[in-house]
Amino acid sequence: MNNKILDEGFLGTRKVTNKEEVKQALREAGINSFYEHKNGNIIVKKGDAIQLEIYFENGSVVIKEKFPRIGNSVQVVVSGVILAIFLFVILLPFPMQWIVAIIGGQLFSYFFFKPKTRDLKKRIESYLGINYMT
């Protein structure tokens, strides 16, 4: 199987009860870019910044969106633009230029990748048979 299952909006009715079933369901959905973290949670990756963490809590599956990785491509470009603006237009003390540029780039990256992360989360929830709305 491949990513077409998720891209076509396949709604699964499968119910998972343990990590191995989650891994098998992800493989069947064509999602092969995941790994088990040393703490036992499953991390699903799509691209350089979109990550979801899947774990069990009180007998139910929980899917948590992770903050985009620091240093992703969007953050680097936006931080560079913000830094250039600060260097040539707005006068700030030297360390503040860098701090504001990096934080601004990371915030932009977060809001840029948020819809994509949310979409992946909803697709995985539908395939795993999780019926709650977030």
Image: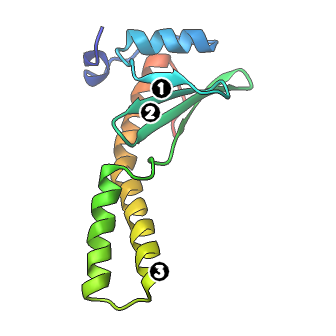
Q: Give the crowd class for mark 1: few <14, some 14-19, many >=20 residues within 10 Å.
A: some
CB under 8 Å between callouts 2 and 1? yes
Disc 3/disc 1 C-alpha distance (Å)? 43 Å
Q: Give the crowd class for mark 3: few <14, some 14-19, many >=20 residues within 10 Å.
A: few
Q: Is residue 124 above or below residue 81?
A: above
Instruction: Determine which residue is flagged by label 3.
Output: 95
Instruction: Determine which residue is flagged by label 2.
Output: 121
Q: Is residue 72 visible?
A: yes
Q: Regarding mark 3 in the picture, which secondary structure is present there? A: helix
Q: Is residue 50 above or below residue 30?
A: below
Instruction: Determine which residue is flagged by label 1.
Output: 125
Q: Regarding mark 2 in the picture, which secondary structure is present there? A: helix
**Quarter of the image where one finds residue 98:** bottom left
Residue 21 placement (x, y as % from top left): 56, 9
Quarter occupied by the N terminus:
top left
Q: Give the crowd class for mark 2: few <14, some 14-19, many >=20 residues within 10 Å.
A: many
Residue 77 placement (x, y as % from top left): 27, 60
The residue drawn where x is 61% and y is 15% is 19
| Marker disc for residue 53 | none
Residue 82 placement (x, y as % from top left): 31, 73
